[in-house]
Amino acid sequence: MRGFLPEINPLREYSIPSPSLDRLQAIADNLPKLLLTGRVPITLESLQHDDLSIDELVAKNLDQDLRLAMVQLSFVAHAYIWGGIKPQEHLPEVVAKPWVQLAKLFDRPPVLSYASYCLHNWFLIEPEESISLENIGLITNFLGGVDEDWFVTVHVCIEHAAADAIEAAEIIAKCTSESSEEEITSLFHRMERSLIDVNQIFSRMPERCDPYIYYHRVRPFIFGSKDNPDLKGGLIYENQFNNEPQFFRGETGAQSSIIPSLDGALGIQHSTDSLRHYLNEMREYMPSEHRKFIENLETTSTIKEFVDQSRNLQDSYNACLEQIRAFRALHLEYASTYIHKQSKQKNPFGSGGSTIRGTGGTPFMSYLKKHRDETEKHKK
């Protein structure tokens, strides 16, 4: 079981020979050096419009190769946009065209999303061993280094650890009045154990991801253009969208399908406000099959009714909610340590992005507090 991670390991190289794909691969592999030397703009601007074409992949419908291209184009585009002293407001057609083409194919916006940053951007160092913090490497980086790698690797391993909870959630959503309390309790315990593992992995973030380095050298590259004061006029994708500025959210953990799936299965509802609107908007950035999975859990699960009627189920239900609350509380703690506090320090590298908004363009501290508190209120 892998939860929302792909069942087949992501490709690190393309499966077919192609000059344009070889070119894209070379640029993506060299991004840390190109960013260090400030050569991303000149590298892309020296190319012809179709030099990074993905038409061969589309024609042959090579799904894994297409996902690799989406990862690499997303990283290359964000390196171009955010790699200089000031953000670029215009993306050259050589990147914009294939990126928009892929985005339409995957039914996601052309922006670096959690799927490309995390879910499809890892490999097993030892292929015969399992997914773990000691056996995962990243396919594509911005500047690279321990802190960037660890930040993403922790999220990959969280996704893997959550697989059992997600499978339990799917079964819970199918429970009916015919289901026994013993069966439901067992599923709650299974979910709780999985989430304990998730929180244990999440708690290891500070081991190798320093808050200062994260804020100044990891975070700046994952912003979007929507609700971003650094790109008030949006981003123009050359010869795409009629050359009209576009506004998309940046990469954020809110685009992970884990918590929305658990919320849906357990009947955790958020009040109708800007936070709920934002959470629903984040689904547009998820893989389409993950969106459908969440929606199915929300529309089919009636487990909360059974819990309301059975004192025997409430303790195990509350135990699951406590792990979700703990996850959200730790996320809030990290937001303070890795973003809010770092914004007060002097900065030798880049801006770190907005100090009051998250990479997804939200007032992150107030949103995260609300996430945590609304979870607590659902306990029985």
Image: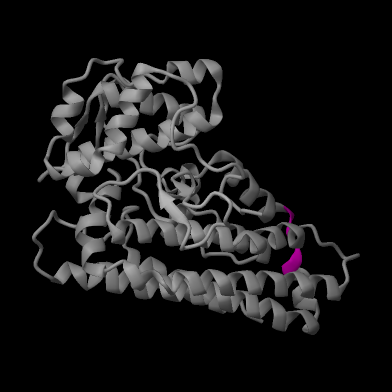
Identify the coloring.
one colour
Q: Is residue 372 above or below residue 33?
A: below
Span of residues in magenta: 300-304
Using the rendered view, name the quadrant where residue 322 is placed. Answer: bottom right
Q: Which residue is at a point 84% across and 70% down the rendered structure image?
A: 183
Q: Position of residue 355 (x, y in %)?
A: 21, 62
Asked whether residue 310 is in view, the answer is yes
Q: Position of residue 360 (x, y in %)?
A: 35, 53
Label count reads: 0
Nearer to us in this view, 141 or 170:
141
Q: Position of residue 237 (x, y in %)?
A: 27, 27
- Quadrant of the drawing holding the N terminus: bottom right
Nearer to us in this view, 256 or 19:
19
Asked whether residue 273 is in view, the answer is no
Nearer to us in this view, 136 or 247:
136
Q: Which residue is at a point 46% across and 45% down the rendered structure image?
A: 115
Nearer to us in this view, 329 or 48:
48
Q: Which residue is at a point 25% across and 40% down the rendered structure image?
A: 31
Magenta run includes residue 43: no
Q: Is residue 372 above or below residue 136?
A: below
- The chief SS type of the magenta part is helix
- Quadrant of the drawing holding the C terminus: bottom right
- In the image, taking residue 256 as reference, residue 322 lies left or right, namely right
Q: Position of residue 163 (x, y in %)?
A: 63, 59
Q: Is residue 343 above or below residue 93?
A: below
- In the image, taking residue 85 as reference, residue 340 lies left or right, namely right
